Image: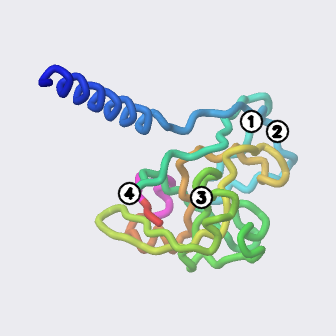
Amino acid sequence: MGLKLLTSSSILLLLLVSFSLHVQAQVCKPSGKVKGKKPPPNKCNKKNLSECCEEGKLYTVYDCSPPITKRTKAVLTINSFQKGGDDGGPSECDNKFHRDSEPVVALSTGWFNNMKRCLHNITIRANGRKVKAMVVDECDSRVGCDEEHDFQPPCPPNIVDASEAVWKALGVPASQGELNVVWSA
């Protein structure tokens, strides 16, 4: 009887470990590449440290983002959602422009989740502070280097692209360009 219990326990333990490793292995992997095109003159807005695509360079694309947890790790970047700002057009969620003084963000494709996070607040934590910000746009991880994306490369899969107001609330100068943060829904 003790041998059967040990065998059953061992099998159960093996299944739990296997399941745990499977869950941990669910990461976002690249889904392809997009070839860079040289932007036409004055077509790539370099405001807020934006990168312009390079002719012929291959950029990695993603259909996913890392799994969301209670404290999802991300990289905070700076974006202007105002008219004439970084990405040119109005926000995808509400077809409006937003002032740099509003705490708003764009999320990488997987986290944006086909607009399901639109107009919902997330909480961003860094530098011993936290701020609530509304999701108004997607930082597209699937495509880039085209006119619709202001000739900028595809977004990495772990980006929270934030207005100046978010940076200010976290007490970090936006000129820093990038900041490791955690966020939650």
Q: CA distance from mark 2 to mark 1?
A: 6 Å
Residue, far front? 1
Q: Disc 4 marks which amino acid?
A: Arg
Residue 180 part of the magenta segment: yes
What residue lies at 44% left-to-right and 63% top-to-bottom? 184
Query: Which amino acid does the dot numbered 3 rest on?
Result: Leu
Q: Nearer the viewer, residue 121 or 44?
A: 121
Residue type at numbered disc 1: Glu
Q: How is the image coloured?
A: rainbow
Q: Secondary structure at mark 4?
A: loop
Q: Which residue is mark 4?
A: 71
**Distance from the alpha carbon under mark 3 to that under mark 2:** 25 Å
Amino acid type assigned to the residue bearing label 2 in the image = Lys
In the image: residue 46, left or right of residue 175: right
Name the quadrant containing residue 83.
bottom right
Q: Which residue in the structure is indicated by mark 1?
A: 54
4 vs 3, front mark: 4
Q: Which residue is mark 2?
A: 38
Q: Which structural element holds mark 1?
A: loop
Q: Residues within 10 Å of mark 2 (few under 14, many from 20)?
A: some
Pointer 3 residue: 107
Residue 87 image position (x, y, % from top left): 73, 60
Q: Residues within 10 Å of mark 4 (few under 14, many from 20)?
A: some
Label 1 crowd bin: few (<14), some (14–19), many (20+), radius 10 Å: some
Disc 4 and disc 2: Cα gap in Å? 38 Å
Q: Could you tell which of marks 4 and 2 lies nearer the N-terminus?
A: 2
Q: Residue furthest top?
A: 3
